Amino acid sequence: MPKKSTNPNLKPLIAQQEIYESYTIRDDNINWWCGGCGNYAIQNALKRALALENISRQEVMFCYDVGCSGNGSDKIEGYTIHGLHGRVLPLAAGHKIANHHMHVIAEAGDGATFSEGVAHVVHAIRNDYPILFLHHDNQNYALTTGQPSSLTPKGCKMNAAPEGLQVEPLNPLEVVLSLKPSFVARTCSADLDHMTETIRTALNHTGFAFVEILQACPTYNKFTTHEWFLEHVKPIESDFPDYDPSDIWQARKLVEIADPLYLGQIYLDKTRKNFLETVEHKDWKDPSLTETVKPVDVSNVLKTFQNN
Ligand SMILES: Cc1ncc(C[n+]2csc(CCOP(=O)(O)OP(=O)(O)O)c2C)c(N)n1
Ligand code: SF4
Ligand SMILES: [Mg+2]
């Protein structure tokens, strides 16, 4: 990160440079994403948001699904766990319940979120687990080399579907809004500042924050590139200055619009109790594993291995 910059947006970040850098992994041997992949910008925005919110590495649990998006686990310094495909949300919820004091961030692709793990999305939203969820929506199964997902537009030619799928894709935010979420925002990997600010807002939400990130995958998704996004996305307020994110019907109408794709806070329910608040009456109010795990002497167990 440059120490001097003419971009005024960078000033507050430069002041937080130490925290930003603490999330940067120092390893020459890691496999990076393809050139131009939107995942670089998403991870950069996440690090920026954490630095600007003054959240140190020790306070965050990063939970990754399987996919190119999940490979972010090798590229960020911190407490990370890389789960099974489609299963990151139960992992993340478990972490949050075990240690309420951590910020728990889960990241997954569209294949994981709207195919293999779709049941977990339903229940994470229903329970309003206090988790930040970043949905890397590149509209395909990228890590397994470009199969169509349930979000790939109808007719788009993909490696495993040379003539394109003939079924209609899901609209991810229509699905999410039908589940009565507490927080929904949309941003785009072509706009680093917008992603950073969106993630900052989501980090401050007290329940399940669903952040839809329109993500470019230049290797396998030839239809929605960064250039395409720049032509087809717009901030909500530019066309709807009176937009009220607490109005679910307005939100539902907004996400039906396919062009332009509106970016910003789509829906926010501040009245909702999150999962931890609904179980406040239970006697495990503070079940932090950091406080309940005690050192155990395992020397006798180790001796049995040495004798063999
Ligand atoms: C249960 C299971 N099924 C299938 C796979 C194979 N697999 C690995 S990554 C992947 C596609 C990932 O696509 P997506 O979730 O959209 O993430 P992306 O790579 O696009 O970021 C698949 C099918 C797997 N690892 N586990
Ligand atoms: S295949 Fe697509 S999503 Fe995966 S690293 Fe390459 S550009 Fe990124
Ligand atoms: Mg994908």
Image (tube, rainbow, N blue to C red):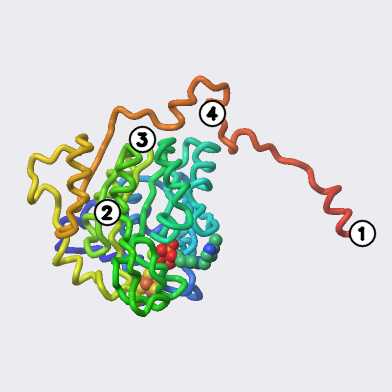
The residue mark sitting in front, 2 or 1, is 2
Kindly identify which residue carries mark 4: 286
The residue mark sitting in front, 3 or 2, is 3
Kindly identify which residue carries mark 2: 196
Alpha carbon distance from label 1 to label 4? 41 Å
The residue mark sitting in front, 1 or 4, is 4
Kindly identify which residue carries mark 1: 307
Between 211 and 155, which is closer to the camera in this rendering? Answer: 155
Q: Which quadrant of the structure image shows residue 34?
A: bottom left
| Residue at position x 14%, y 59% in the image | 260
Type of the residue with mark 1: Asn
Would the CB of label 1 be found within 8 Å of ligand 1?
no
> Quick check: can you spot residue 24?
no
Task: Return the mark for residue 206.
Answer: 3
Query: Along the horizontal axis of the image, is 256 left or right of 101?
Result: left
> Could you tell me if the residues under marks 1 and 4 are in contact, i.e. CB atoms within 8 Å?
no
> Could you tell me if the residues under marks 3 and 2 are in contact, i.e. CB atoms within 8 Å?
no
